[in-house]
Image: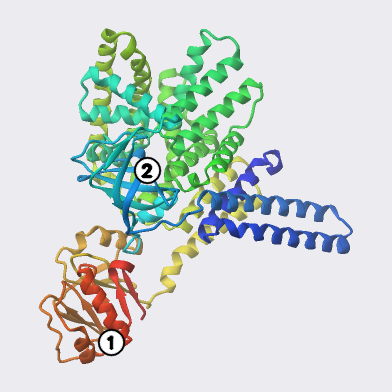
Amino acid sequence: MMKVMKHPMIPITFFYVNGIFLSDYFSIRFQTIFWVIPLTALILLFLFFHTLLNNNVRNEAARFFSWLFVALFFILAGISSYSFTNRQDKLVYEVSRFYSITVEEQLKPNSSQNRYYGTLIQDNKKHRVLIYQSVKDSIWQTGQTFISYVAVKPIHTAKNPYQFNYAAYLSKKNIYGQIKVDSVYKILPPQKDFYHYVAFVREQLKESFDLHGYDQEVRGIIYALLFGQRQDLSETVEKNYRDAGVVHVLSVSGLHIGLLYYVLNFILGLGIRNRNYRFLGVVSFLIFFAFLSGLSGPVVRSVVMFSLVGFGSMLRKNTSTIHILIVSMFFILLLYPNYVFDIGFQLSYMAVYAIIYLYPLIRKYFRKENKLLNFFSEMVAISLVAQLGVLPLSLYYFGQFPLLFLIGNLIVVTTTNLVLLGLLLLLALNYINEYLARYLGYVIEYLILFGNKVTEMIAAQHQWILTDISVKLTECIVYILLIFSVAWLLKKYTYKKIILLLILLISLQINYLIPYLKKGVTEQYVLYDYRNFTYVELSSDKYHFYTTDPNVQQQHYIKEFIREKGKKQIVIHHVENSFKNGNKLFLLVDSLGIYKTSQKADVIVLINNPAVNLDRLIEYHQPRQLIVHPGNKKWRKENWLTSCDKKNIPYHDMREKGYMTFNN
């Protein structure tokens, strides 16, 4: 392992990234930093002078305080950067008024609505929002501005445990509100800034492909590869690429930027002999291409990284690739710290780091004398180490692993490289020579359809796709450390490395033993379901579901719950009006409004808008808890909650709070 001070950006980036995580985890406000920094400085000064008086300025003390200062400085820098970027001016929700709205980015539409990121002006302050528009209306272009009468609404948080939290995801993009635009009051002239002209150029380039008459399937692949736009990709095609383990080729990333870098370097080298001018030309085009493709995390990372490689080459310095990778990460996160939470950004960096660090260990086993065989052999090796590097993150985020990823990468990545090179040439021919453009267009169409067919065949082999894999965050971190610790050990055996490896293995074992230590402890939940009632009791070996839903096991939120909690025997109890679990009697009061039973209920669930006098119901049962199901009408719910407050009965509003947990 390289010496830390030989590459100082490694610890600096490590501390800075941890500062970002700390700021997010503890929700540190930007204003807080103003008193944290002076307080930290005072503590450091006190410790430093205390050391002077007691240790006579020994070198160890000076070194310790140097490290402590660097660590605290960059941790605070990370906290400050993230807090400043995510400072939030409070949005006013649920008040309809006229707003000036600007479209920033078009997203992939769903079956009924187009979706966009945009900004609106509220009380003279700009706010980023999620915009919904009916699919029947004309699609808005990036930079388009209009006035509409709408109400800003909060973005709903996850209502069930282990469910994807869309509100938290959007908060990392500084989006805290959503609007639905039914009618546009007035179209304003577009804001003709840099982003407007980039969007205009992108649309012109996209229109240049109209002469080929490509169908939606081919267009979707072209727009994804060239412009980073996946809105036109069908769900089927995207799922096939994901199940085949090659979905990464549909995102503009290091693969595309690397090809662009070397192709542009070669083309410009034919006419520009001065390497400095050639470097500036290549980097200028790459930066423009990054804007053209929407400034996604992998694109920005790749452009910065290849720019640094080119800069080092221009200065005739042989800089460490890992150091360049770390420097690119630091500068990207310095400008936009939220990228650290972007899944594509994380996977991209982990894959590149794995290739740089792990590939040299296995390269000798894949070398072939024949150049063609060597090319495919190296492709296999690179795919293996890249997949190994991103494996813990992939399992943590997606919970599945395609075993046929090698075949997919070998065929589809090779095909995609040819398609991308062909598309770069085709872009120019679309404007220069329509005759040649059409012939090249046929070849590209064939290659795209061939790649789609291969992914479809691989994705159809469901028995080779491992699904419903649950990996917790702590396990993910330990797995990553374990993979690279083994590689570190293989480079050079030392006693300390072996000890580190054993510690990681023991920590992994402890993590797996923790659930067994909780044997005998039961967990109880009322899960969020708009139409049905579902109560689950989880013991060490069984799931007991008490539910009104005959198809409860097919529900997506149930599958997510079981995946995270682990597979156990499932026992279904279909309930109608009441059921008993342990010492608690649950009563479901539905639209019939029947609540008089022989036994007094401990927990009452109001479901399906019962026309019931809640005061009498409470008087009759004296329940310990009342649950308001999310499917009830809002006005009824408000009346019920008022009655609970008067009677001092604890209640849980599932529409607002989501699922509920019970203590043993």
Q: Which mark is residue 583?
A: 1
Q: Position of residue 61 (x, y in %)?
A: 81, 56
Q: Nearer the viewer, residue 592 or 74?
A: 592
Image quadrant assignment for residue 611 = bottom left
Q: Amino acid at mark 2?
A: Gly
- Position above or below: 235 against 636: above
Q: Is residue 385 visible?
A: no
User: Residue 556 location, x and y as percent?
Assistant: 25, 57
User: Up-down: is 477 above or below 361?
Assistant: below
Q: Which three-letter amino acid code belongs to the residue tagged 1?
A: Asn
Q: Secondary structure beneath disc 2?
A: strand
Check the image and report above or below for 352 versus 421: below
Label 2, label 1: how far apart the Cα atoms are: 52 Å
Quarter of the figure that contains the N terminus: top right
User: Number of numbered discs present?
Assistant: 2
Q: Secondary structure at mark 1?
A: loop
Residue 563 image offset from top left, x and y in percent: 32, 59
Direction left: furthest residue: 592
Chain-order first, disc 2 or disc 1:
2
Q: Which residue is mark 2?
A: 118
Residue 238 pos. (x, y %): 28, 38
Q: Residues within 10 Å of mark 2 (few under 14, many from 20)?
A: many
> Foreground: 438 or 622?
622
Front in this rendered view, residue 553 or 222? 222
